[in-house]
Image: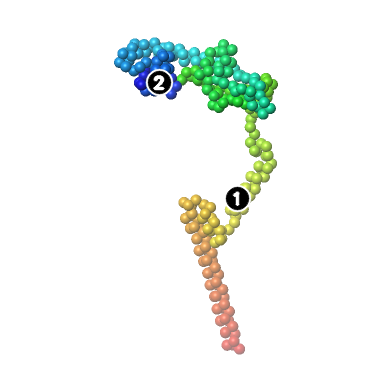
Amino acid sequence: MEVILLESLNKLGGIGDLVTVKDGYARNYLIPQKKALRANDENKEYFSKIKQDLVEKNKKIIEDAQLIVQKILKLEVIFIRNASDNGQLYGSVSPKDVSNYFIEKKISIKPSHVNFHDAIKKIGIYDINIRLHPEVGCNLRINIATSEENAKIQKDEFEKPKKNVEDIFPEKVSVEKNELIDSSENNEKKNITPKTKDKIKKDIPKNEAKKTDETIDKTDVTNTKIESESESNEEKLNKTEKKKLTKKKEKE
């Protein structure tokens, strides 16, 4: 069924939007609660006459909701509950409990305005969401404890900065870092041998493999050239020695 929204609704739209919803949802909730009108010609004409009043009314609702959010954000919400030794509550905390808590503080918040991320069945600190209007809401932290004293302990523990490994074992981390640095430096100083050539190709990115091959090949060529020159020099020396010996024998 297509309806005209008379107020902003979560996941549906804003005032005056034409939306399609299930027939049952429209007949049993939206239309009886005066949150929407059936989208026929007669109602469209009627809506055009009351639209400005609805917009002004919605603006006032938003302003009131914003004031309520400012109030509840200043509160420290604590629920004292009985629980077993392992922290399991004898009865969970519900959105209605949160609504009643605020009603006692003279703040009007309906259970439908309270959204839990998870069911609250154990002591601890939880984040919940308060949605007073599609455009106005806030996240709120509530503390569930077995006593006021335990609530304070939980809060202090929760707000305590979490330590990093470096803070807990500074000496160990320092030693491990130095070992890694030394290991890296030693690896850089090692000469490249033919046996390590394949391993290097596996450890480096593909786009760098070609460059590495060229570098290693150049090194191999240089070494080969040096060895050839060395062998050539030895041969020359041997020939010179042989000539000297031959001349010596001829003189004798």
Counting from the top left corner in percent of width and height, residue 156 is at: 66, 25
Numbered mark located on residue 32 in the image = none
User: Could you tell me the amino acid type at mark 2?
Assistant: Gly
Disc number lying in front (2 or 1): 2
**Where is 156 relative to 6, above or below?**
below
Residue for badge 1: 184
Q: Is residue 74 visible?
A: no
Looking at this view, is 6 or 153 the one in front?
A: 6
Counting from the top left corner in percent of width and height, residue 109 is at: 53, 15
**Where is 140 relative to 34, above or below?**
below
Q: Relative to residue 151, is residue 30 drawn left or right?
A: left
Check the picture and name the quadrant holding the N terminus. Answer: top left
At 58% from the left and 58% from the top, the residue drawn is 191
Residue for badge 2: 24
Looking at this view, is 32 or 172 the one in front?
A: 32
CA gap between label 2 and label 1 equals: 70 Å
